[in-house]
Image (tube, coloured by chain):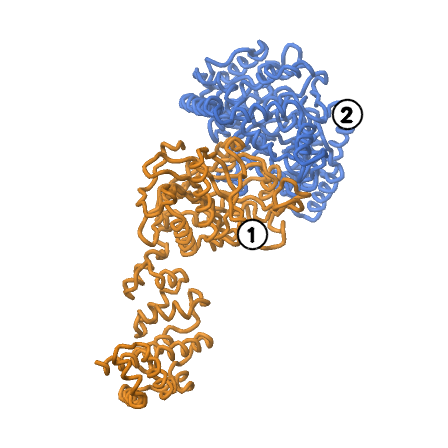
C-alpha cells in the first residue's frame, strides 16, 4: 500500500513530541490455544523437550501435506468477531522465503483473502483503533544461535533448531496506524490481550512469546503528509513497547531536524541499551513470491458456523467494565474497574453484591486484597459479603475490615463474625465512642483549644489518645467526624 | 483362466483361491527382472527381499484360511517419487540420495493393506520433470519394445516395468502427461484420474495443483482394478475429493452404443501421420461400435503448453526450495552454511530441474507475476471453460496421447522445447483437473506402439473406461491390425 492510500484516524493533538505527531500501527501475532498444530496432529505445547512435537508435515518432509485445524479456524473467528471484523471466505497462500527454522522454505499464510477484515478495537477511553485484518498463519521453528554476540545468526558458531513451534497456529492482527501516543499503543495491546484471553483464543503472554508485537512508527508535523515508517521488532513487554515507540519517534525527529531523511527499514529494539538498531533495509526485503497454496482448498466457514461462534462469544472486557461501572458507580476507565476486570474478578464482585453487600465496597476490597487471586477467587462471595455488611453497619472499622479480609483470603473463606470475635474486634457503638472522645478532650485542654483555633495538626494528639483508650477499636474516620462536629 | 496368471486381476483371483502361491508369482517376475533389467533400467531399486517376505505373508494368510485382500499377491512397481517407509525414495535426484522416508504414501499403505506386493521403485525424470526419463540422475530407462529408444517420461520406469512384464501393474504420477505419454510409447495402458481422486499424501510434489497418481497395466481391466483400489477420500490430503472408491471394473463390458465421442477440430497440429492415422482408426472403431462422433472446438487449447510451463515450474520452484541438504538427503560441505546450501543444490539438482526452478521463480517474482503466472492462471480458466462447453456435447474426447512414437535416446535431450512438445495433448487435462488415459491402439509403420488418449470431464472415469475398453476390444478382435 502506498502512503497516499493509508488513512489515519484524526489526531486530537494531545500528544506531541517537539511539535511532531506520532503515527503508529501495531502488528500483533498471537499463538492460538489449540491442542494441535495448524496443519498437523502434533501437539501445540510450549516448553517441552525440543523436537518432540514433530511429524512429516511439521518437518516439511517431501510428500507431506497440510490439513487445516478446525479449532484454529474457530479461534481465529472468535478473534475476528471480538474485534468487530467481518468474517469472510478466505484462502491460503505460500509466502516463499528461505530461513533455516522454516522447513518447507515457505510459510502458509493468508494473503489477499484473509478470514477477518475491517474491524476495530475500542480503547478504554473510547477511541477506536482500526483493525485492517486478522489472518491465520503458521509459526516457524525456533532458532538458538550459539556463540558470537547477541544471539544473532551472523557470527555464531552453530545454530540449534527446535521444530516444536513450527506449524503452531498464529493469528496476525494488523492494526491501522491510528495510534497517536506510546500510551495508546500500550492500551491497545493491553486491551487486545484481555480480549484474546476472554474469548479463549490464546494465553497471550508476551514474555513467553505467545503474543508478539511489532510496531510501525513514523512522525510528521500536524497536517503534513505521512512520514517514512520504520518497523520495530523484538518488543517483549507492554512497557518496552511504549519505550521503543517513544525512542523511535525521537530518533526520527532528530534525523528530520538534522536535515536527514528516514530510511524505510526494519529495526530491532534492544532492551538493554533502550535503543532501536537497523535489522534490514527495504532494499534487502525478500520477494515472497506469494501464490495460492495448492495443497489447501478455500476456507468458507459459512454463515451458520460464523453465527454460532458469534452467539457463543463471552462478554468482552469493555462491556464488562461498563457493567461493573454501572453497578458500582466507579468510572469505567478508572483504576479499580480496569484492574478488577483485567483480573476477571468482576463477576465475583457482582456476586458479592448479590449476597447483600455494598457493591462499591466490594469493588475496593477485591481490587486491594485479591491481586494474587484469579478470575475465581477462593473466598466464597457470601463470606466476603458478610464481612462487608459488618463493615458498613459499623461493626468493623475499615482497618479491622482489612484485617478480617486478609484472614479470609489466607484461609480461602470463613465466617467474618467468628474471625472478628477471635481478634477481639468488638462492635463499638457511637455513645461509647463519644464518651472516650469527651474524656480525651477533657484530658488535653491545650490540644483541644489549638484544634478549635484551627490548628489541624493538634488533632493528632487527641486521635492518638482516643485510639489508645479504645484499644484500636475506634474507627479513625468516625473519630475525626466526631471531633469536627464537636468543634462546631 | 490360464494356468499361469499374468494380469493383476487373474493373479489376485488365483492367489485368493489358493490355486497359485504369491511367492511363485513374485519369483516369476523377479526372474524376468533378473534377465532384462540391466538392458531396460526400469528400476532405481528392486526390493526383492521385502517383496519375498510380503509374498510369504500373503501365502501364510491364504494357508490359514484368511483373505489377504483384493490385490492378493499382485506384484506392483512404484514410481520412485512415492514415499515408502524405510525404503529409499530418490525422485531420481542426487539431492534425495540416501533418504529413507519415515512414512508410507497413502497409496503405498492402501496397496499393501489390499495384499499387493511392491517389487521396487521405478526410475523417472528427476522430480518428474521430463518426457523421456533421460533427466534421471541414475541413467535413462530404455523402451522394452526397442531399447534404442526412450520409454517416455517422466514415469518411464513404471511404463517400462509393465511393458517388460517386470510387474503386471505399476503406479506413476502425471503432472502434464507423465503417465499417459510413457504408456503410449511403451504400448501399455496408463491412467491419469480426476484431480483429487487419488491421495497425493506421500507423493513428492512437483506441481501440487497438477500432480495426480495413476496406474499402468497391460490391459484396461487391470488399470480399472488398481484405480478402484487406490481411489477414495484421504483425510491427509485436503484436495482429496470426499467420496468413496471409483466403480470401474463393472462398466468395462458396457457397450458404447449412443455415446458421443468428441473430435477436436482445432487440435494443435504437428502430430506424426502414423499417430493421426491411428486416431482416425479409433474414431472408426467407435463409430462402428455404435458411438456418434461429434466435432468440438477448444480454441484455448493451443495456449495450454505455455500456461503449463509457467504454472508447473512456479509451483515446483516453491516445492523444491526445501532441499537444502540440512535435514535429509545429500549434503555437499563447504566453508560456511550459505556456501553449503549453494554447493548442495548445485550438485544435487540436474539441469532440467534447475531450469524449471529458475523459470518458476521468475514467473512468480514481483513485477512479473501478472504478466506470467497471473496470465497463465487465466489461460487455465479459459481451458476449463472450453472443456466445459465441449463436454456439453461430447461424453469423451479422443486425441493422440503423444504426437510421436518413442524417439531415439538422445534425440531430444539437448532441445528442451521439442521435449516439452511431447506433452502438447496431455497437458490440458491436467490444467483442467480432468481424467484422461492412454490406450494402446496399434503401431507405427516402424512397429512402434501408438496410444490413443481418451479424455473425460471431472469424475468422468466411467465413460472414459467404457470407451477405452471398447477400443481395447476392437484391437483384440482385429488381432491388433486395425
Q: Which residue is mark 1?
A: A43
Q: Chain of mark 1?
A: A
- Residue at mark 1 shares a chain with residue at mark 2: no
Q: Position of residue B226 (x, y in %)?
A: 60, 34
Number of marks drawn: 2
Residue at horizontal 46%, vertical 37%? A255
Pointer 2: residues within 10 angstroms few (<14), some, or many (20+)? few
Residue A33's place in the image compared with A156, above or below, is: below
Q: Nearer the viewer, mark 1 or mark 2?
A: 1
Q: Which residue is mark 2?
A: B38
Which residue is more in the foreground, A219 or B389? A219
In the figure, the blue chain has which letter? B
Q: Position of residue A471 (x, y in %)?
A: 38, 87
Q: Position of residue B428 (x, y in %)?
A: 50, 22
Q: Position of residue A180 (x, y in %)?
A: 37, 45
Determine which quarter of the picture holds residue B451.
top right
In the displayed structure image, the side of residue B203 where residue B49 appears, left or right: right
SS under mark 2: helix
In the displayed structure image, the side of residue A182 where residue A434 appears, left or right: left
Evaluate whether residue B460 shows in this view: yes
SS under mark 1: loop
Q: CA distance from mark 1 to mark 2?
A: 48 Å
In the figure, the orange chain has which letter? A
Which residue is more in the foreground, A342 or A40? A342
Amino acid at each position: 500500500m502506498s502512503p497516499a492510500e493509508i488513512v489515519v484516524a484524526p489526531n486530537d493533538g494531545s500528544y506531541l513530541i517537539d511539535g511532531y505527531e506520532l503515527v503508529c500501527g501495531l502488528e500483533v501475532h498471537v499463538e492460538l490455544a489449540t491442542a494441535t498444530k495448524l496443519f498437523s496432529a502434533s501437539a501445540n505445547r510450549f516448553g517441552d523437550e525440543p523436537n518432540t512435537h514433530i511429524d512429516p508435515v511439521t518437518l516439511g518432509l517431501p510428500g507431506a501435506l497440510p490439513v487445516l485445524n478446525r479449532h484454529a479456524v474457530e479461534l481465529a473467528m472468535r478473534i475476528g468477531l471480538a474485534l468487530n471484523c467481518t468474517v469472510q471466505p478466505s484462502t491460503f497462500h505460500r509466502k516463499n522465503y528461505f530461513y533455516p527454522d522454516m522447513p518447507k522454505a515457505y510459510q502458509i499464510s493468508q494473503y489477499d483473502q484473509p478470514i477477518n477484515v475491517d474491524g476495530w478495537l475500542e480503547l478504554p477511553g473510547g477511541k477506536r483503533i482500526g483493525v485492517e485484518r486478522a489472518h491465520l498463519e503458521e509459526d516457524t521453528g525456533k532458532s538458538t544461535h550459539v556463540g558470537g554476540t547477541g544471539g544473532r545468526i551472523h557470527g555464531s558458531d552453530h545454530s540449534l533448531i527446535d521444530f516444536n513451534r513450527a506449524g503452531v497456529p498464529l493469528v496476525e492482527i494488523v492494526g491501522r496506524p491510528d495510534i497517536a501516543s506510546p500510551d495508546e499503543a500500550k492500551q491497545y495491546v493491553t486491551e487486545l490481550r484481555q480480549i484474546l484471553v476472554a474469548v479463549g483464543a490464546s494465553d497471550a503472554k508476551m514474555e513467553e512469546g505467545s503474543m508478539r508485537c511489532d510496531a510501525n512508527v513514523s512522525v510528521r508535523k500536524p497536517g503534513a503528509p505521512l512520514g517514512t515508517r520504520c518497523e520495530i521488532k523484538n518488543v517483549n513487554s507492554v512497557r518496552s513497547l511504549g519505550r521503543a515507540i517513544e525512542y523511535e519517534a525521537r530518533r526520527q525527529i532528530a534525523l528530520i531536524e538534522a536535515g536527514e531523511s528516514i530510511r524505510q527499514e526494519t529495526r530491532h529494539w534492544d532492551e538493554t541499551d533502550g535503543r532501536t538498531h537497523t535489522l534490514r533495509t527495504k532494499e534487502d526485503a525478500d520477494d515472497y513470491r506469494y501464490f495460492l497454496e495448492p495443497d489447501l482448498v478455500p476456507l468458507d466457514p459459512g454463515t451458520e458456523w460464523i453465527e454460532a461462534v458469534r452467539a457463543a462469544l463471552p462478554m468482552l472486557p469493555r462491556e464488562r467494565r461498563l457493567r461493573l461501572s454501572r453497578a458500582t458507580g466507579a468510572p469505567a476507565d478508572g483504576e479499580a474497574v480496569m484492574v478488577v476486570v483485567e483480573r476477571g474478578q468482576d463477576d465475583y464482585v457482582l456476586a458479592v453484591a448479590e449476597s447483600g453487600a455494598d457493591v462499591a465496597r466490594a469493588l475496593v476490597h477485591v481490587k486491594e486484597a485479591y491481586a494474587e487471586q484469579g478470575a475465581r477467587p477462593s473466598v466464597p462471595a457470601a463470606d466476603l459479603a458478610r464481612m462487608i455488611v459488618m463493615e458498613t453497619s459499623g461493626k468493623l472499622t475499615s482497618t479491622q475490615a482489612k484485617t478480617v479480609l486478609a484472614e479470609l483470603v489466607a484461609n480461602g473463606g470463613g465466617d467474618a463474625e467468628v474471625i472478628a470475635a477471635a481478634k477481639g474486634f468488638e462492635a463499638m457503638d457511637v455513645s461509647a465512642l463519644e464518651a472516650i472522645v469527651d474524656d480525651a478532650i477533657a484530658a488535653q485542654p491545650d490540644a483541644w483549644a489549638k484544634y478549635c483555633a484551627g490548628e489541624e495538626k493538634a488533632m493528632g494528639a487527641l486521635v492518638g489518645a482516643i485510639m489508645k483508650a479504645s484499644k484500636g477499636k475506634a474507627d479513625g474516620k468516625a473519630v475525626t467526624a466526631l471531633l469536627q462536629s464537636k468543634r462546631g | 483362466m490360464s494356468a499361469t496368471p499374468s494380469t493383476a486381476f487373474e493373479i489376485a483371483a488365483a492367489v485368493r483361491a489358493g490355486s497359485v502361491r504369491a511367492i511363485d508369482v513374485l519369483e516369476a517376475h523377479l526372474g524376468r527382472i533378473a534377465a532384462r533389467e540391466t538392458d531396460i533400467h526400469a528400476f532405481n531399486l528392486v526390493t526383492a527381499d521385502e517383496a519375498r517376505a510380503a509374498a510369504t505373508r500373503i501365502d501364510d494368510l491364504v494357508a490359514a484360511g484368511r483373505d489377504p485382500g483384493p490385490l492378493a499377491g499382485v506384484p506392483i512397481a512404484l514410481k520412485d517419487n512415492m514415499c515408502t517407509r524405510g525404503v529409499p525414495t530418490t525422485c531420481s535426484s542426487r539431492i534425495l540420495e540416501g533418504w529413507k522416508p519415515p512414512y508410507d504414501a497413502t497409496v503405498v499403505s492402501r496397496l499393501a493393506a489390499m495384499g499387493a506386493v511392491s517389487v521396487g521403485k521405478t526410475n523417472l525424470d528427476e522430480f518428474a520433470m521430463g518426457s523421456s526419463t533421460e533427466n534421471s540422475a541414475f541413467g535413462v530407462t530404455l523402451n522394452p519394445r526397442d531399447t534404442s529408444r526412450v520409454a517416455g517420461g517422466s514415469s518411464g520406469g513404471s511404463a517400462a516395468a509393465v511393458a517388460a512384464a517386470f510387474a503386471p501393474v505399476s503406479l506413476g504420477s502425471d503432472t502434464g502427461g507423465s503417465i499417459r505419454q510413457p504408456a503410449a510409447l511403451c504400448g501399455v495402458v496408463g491412467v491419469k484420474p480426476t484431480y483429487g481422486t487419488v491421495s497425493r499424501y506421500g507423493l513428492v510434489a512437483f506441481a501440487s495443483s497438477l500432480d495426480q497418481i495413476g496406474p499402468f497395466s497391460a490391459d484396461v481391466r487391470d488399470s480399472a482394478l488398481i484405480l478402484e483400489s487406490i481411489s477414495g477420500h484421504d483425510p491427509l490430503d485436503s484436495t482429496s475429493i470426499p467420496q468413496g472408491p471409483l466403480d470401474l471394473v463393472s462398466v468395462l463390458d458396457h457397450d458404447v452404443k449412443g455415446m458421443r465421442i468428441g473430435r477436436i477440430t482445432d487440435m494443435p497440429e504437428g502430430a506424426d501421420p502414423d499417430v493421426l492415422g491411428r486416431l482416425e482408426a479409433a474414431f472408426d472403431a467407435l463409430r462402428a461400435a455404435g458411438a456418434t462422433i461429434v466435432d468440438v472446438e477448444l480454441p484455448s487449447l493451443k495456449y495450454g503448453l505455455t500456461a503449463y510451463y509457467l504454472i508447473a515450474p512456479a509451483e515446483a520452484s516453491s516445492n523444491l526450495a526445501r532441499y537444502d541438504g540440512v535435514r535429509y538427503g545429500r549434503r555437499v560441505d563447504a566453508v560456511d552454511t550459505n556456501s553449503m546450501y549453494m554447493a548442495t543444490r548445485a550438485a544435487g539438482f540436474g539441469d532440467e530441474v534447475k531450469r524449471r526452478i529458475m523459470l518458476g521463480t521468475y514467473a512468480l517474482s514481483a513485477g512479473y507475476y501478472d504478466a506470467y503466472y497471473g496470465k497463465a492462471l487465466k489461460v487455465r480458466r479459459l481451458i476449463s471453460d472450453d472443456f466445459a462447453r465441449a463436454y456439453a456435447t461430447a461424453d469423451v474426447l479422443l486425441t493422440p496421447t503423444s504426437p510421436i512414437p518413442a524417439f531415439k535416446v538422445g534425440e531430444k535431450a539437448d532441445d528442451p522445447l521439442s521435449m516439452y512438445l511431447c506433452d502438447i495433448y496431455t497437458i490440458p487435462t491436467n490444467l483442467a483437473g480432468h481424467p484422461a488415459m492412454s490406450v494402446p491402439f496399434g503401431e507405427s509403420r516402424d512397429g512402434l506402439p501408438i496410444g490413443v488418449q481418451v479424455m473425460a470431464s471431472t469424475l468422468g472415469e466411467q465413460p472414459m473406461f467404457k470407451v477405452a475398453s471398447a477400443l481395447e476390444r476392437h484391437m483384440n478382435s482385429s488381432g491388433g491390425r486395425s
